Image: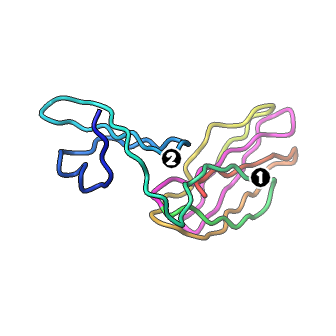
Amino acid sequence: MPQFRSRADLCSLGMVLAVTVHASGTTARQLELNGDRSQLAVPMERTAKSAAVRVVESLSPGTVTITTADLEANIEVRARSTGSTSCAVEFTAPSGTIGVVAPPGEYSSWSTLATHIGKVTLKVDARVVCDSGALAEVRYFR
């Protein structure tokens, strides 16, 4: 299996279809070359930047300031009612506000609050709109 050291080497061969970053410091890039798809292990160049890590932070309820990784990704939120009935939770970021129904006993599915390109710092707010209370979380790449 050939090893390539730069993105230019990959681009000169064809179109990069997918990139997967592994914890070992290698990436698997799937290329289509004349209709043939194959996996290539490509060593990553070590730089001062560290790899982005997906994190989950509590917002129960309140405001948190987050700083994202320098990439294109979604900022997602979810909530769980602390009472015996569902509860509404409003999440706010500079891009707008969304509402999530927090079920009792389990977290809701993740909902996209915002999308960013590059490193950004912003405040995410969770406001519980019921008497029983709720727990809230935000998920993003740092």
Looking at the picture, does residue 138 appear above or below residue 93? above
In the foreground, 101 or 51: 51
Where is residue 125? Give x, y as percent.
71, 62
Between discs 2 and 1, the one toward the N terminus: 2
Residue 49 lies left or right of residue 135; in this view the side is left
Q: Residue at x 67, y 37 (%)?
A: 108
Using the image as rendered, state which of residue 140 and residue 106 is in the foreground.
Answer: 140
Q: Amino acid at mark 1?
A: Ser
Res 28 quadrant in image: top left
Q: Secondary structure at mark 1?
A: strand
Q: Is residue 84 rendered to the left or right of residue 127?
A: right
Q: Nearer the viewer, residue 9 or 102?
A: 9
> Which quadrant would the N terminus be assigned to in this image?
top left
Of the residues tagged 2 and 1, which is closer to the observer? 2
Q: 61 left or right of 120?
A: right
Image coords of residue 6 (percent x, y): 31, 55
Image spot of residue 100 (x, y percent):
65, 46
What is the spatial separation of the Cα atoms under label 2 and label 1, in whole angstroms?
29 Å
Considering the whole magenta stretch, tell me its main secondary structure: strand
The residue that mark 1 highlights is 58
According to the picture, the residue beneath numbered tag 2 turns out to be: 25
Q: What residue is drawn where x is 24% and y is 52%?
A: 9
Residue 96 lies within the magenta run: yes
Q: How many marks?
A: 2
Neighbor class of circle 2 (other Cα within 10 Å; few <14, some 14-19, many 20+) is: few
**Which image quarter is the C terminus in?**
bottom right
Q: Tell me where the magenta segment starts and ends, as one range.
A: 71-99
Say which residue appears at 77% left-offset and 55% top-offset: 59
The x and y percentages for residue 107 are 72, 36
